[in-house]
Amino acid sequence: MSLQEHVNGQTKSREEVRDAILDGIAEAVEESKNLVPNSRATALKDLAEAYAWVSSPGHPH
């Protein structure tokens, strides 16, 4: 299956995808509590970038 065929076959709405990503970010925040402080800071920064991209995809991040 080509990438275009895969994309065309998607049935989830933009909101469903956004909600799934935000749920994943929330889970990752909880999991980051097991990391050492330096690694946790990096992980949380990356999650903040992901949240910014999902929340405002039209803005540069």
Image: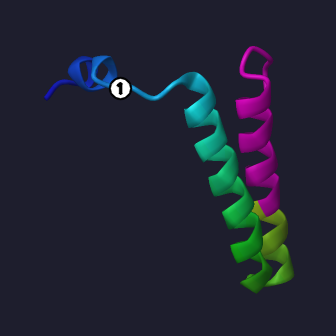
Residue 4 part of the magenta-drawn span: no
Q: Amino acid at mark 1?
A: Gln
Q: Nearer the viewer, residue 41 or 10?
A: 10
Residue 6 percent across, percent down from the top left? 26, 26
Q: Nearer the viewer, residue 44 or 7?
A: 7
Query: What predominant SS class does the magenta segment belong to?
Result: helix
Residue 51 part of the magenta-drawn span: yes
Quarter of the figure with the C terminus: top right
Instruction: From the image, tell me which residue sits under label 1.
Output: 10
Q: Nearer the viewer, residue 8 or 13?
A: 13
Residue 50 percent across, percent down from the top left? 71, 42
Disc 1 packing (10 Å; few <14; some 14–19; many ≥20): few
Classify 51 as above or below 53: below
Classify 2 as above or below 18: above
Taking the image as shown, residue 44 lies to the left or right of residue 50, namely right
| Residue at left offset 13%, top offset 29% | 1
| Residue at left offset 26%, top offset 17% | 4
Q: Which residues are magenta?
A: 44-61
Specify the quadrant of the image occupied by residue 3: top left
